[in-house]
Image (cartoon, rainbow, N blue to C red):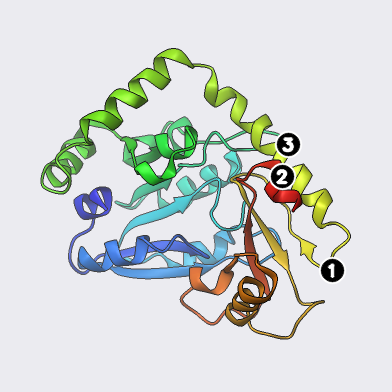
Amino acid sequence: YAAITALVRRGDEVICFDPSYDSYAPAVALAGGELRRIALQPPHFRVDWQQFAAALSDKTRLVILNTPHNPSATVWQREDFAALWQAIAEREIYVLSDEVYEHICFAEGGHASVLAHPQLRERAVAVSSFGKTFHMTGWKVGYCVAPAAISAELRKVHQYLTFSVNTPAQLAIADMLREAPEHYRELPAFYRERRDLFIEALRPSRLELLPCEGTYFLLADYSAISDLDDVSFCRWLTTEVGVATIPLSVFCADPFPHKLIRLCFAKQPATLLA
């Protein structure tokens, strides 16, 4: 929210890629911006760069991206950042890169950050999460990396938004960073084991599982099981089967014709196998 408020002015256009995290749109609206959504298509949810270029206008101020991506579990590649730069190089456009799942990445090339691109990083804010990295998502403690000029504007907003993280949380995170500096390196293997266990457990079912390159989410196509829309199917799963899932349509503004649900494998193995 602080980054969007710092960068977006009334009347500016902001581009994001659907399905997208539901906090982006309200933040853009509160800043007076207009959100333009580009729909990514299953099963791979890759950006169509011609479509992206066509969506740019003189009013475009900010591009919001998320990698590894919630909810699709796809990962941006270095070629994607090169294509993004090619599209916006001659325009005054900033980038907000939501990288909160950066350490939960299974892609062969690993996590690619906007900060690794020499030109984009001069216009970018990269957002990270201690909560995701240290298994304490409810604490909602994160940080961002940005050039000094952008950071100065962001801190003006943040000063009156939250002032600071509560002291006990700061001390706890400091202890974790000091006592287990290697923790983040172990996260891919930690979650890959759970992902693979979950996939094997679901293999006999009629769910069609989509590729999972990162995050602790897994998408499943249930079209072989039911004709219900995704919201109704998730409600049925919860009430009749006892399994809570998320319908993918809630991450999209336009009607979502695909029968896809989001599953979470950030659970104990016994829970995943139950």
How far apart are the two marked residues, 1 and 3, measured between alpha carbons? 22 Å
Q: Residue furthest top?
A: 179
In this picture, is 198 found above or below 221?
above
How far apart are the two marked residues, 3 and 2, measured between alpha carbons? 13 Å
How far apart are the two marked residues, 2 and 1, measured between alpha carbons? 21 Å
> What residue is drawn where x is 55% and y is 46%?
68
Marks 3 and 2, the one that precedes in the sequence: 3
Asked where in the image residue 110 lies, by quadrant, the reply is: top right
**Dot 1: what SS?**
loop
Residue that mark 2 sits on: 270
Question: For the residue marked with disc 3, what is the amino acid?
Answer: Glu
Residue sitting nearer the eye, 118 or 156: 156
Question: For the residue marked with disc 2, what is the amino acid?
Answer: Ala
Report x, y in % for residue 144: 33, 36
Q: Residue furthest right?
A: 204
Across the whole image, how many numbered discs are drawn on residues? 3
**Tag 1 and tag 3, C-beta contact below 8 Å:** no
In this picture, is 34 found above or below 185?
below
Residue that mark 3 sits on: 193
Residue that mark 1 sits on: 206
Marks 1 and 3, the one that precedes in the sequence: 3
> What residue is drawn where x is 54% and y is 17%?
182
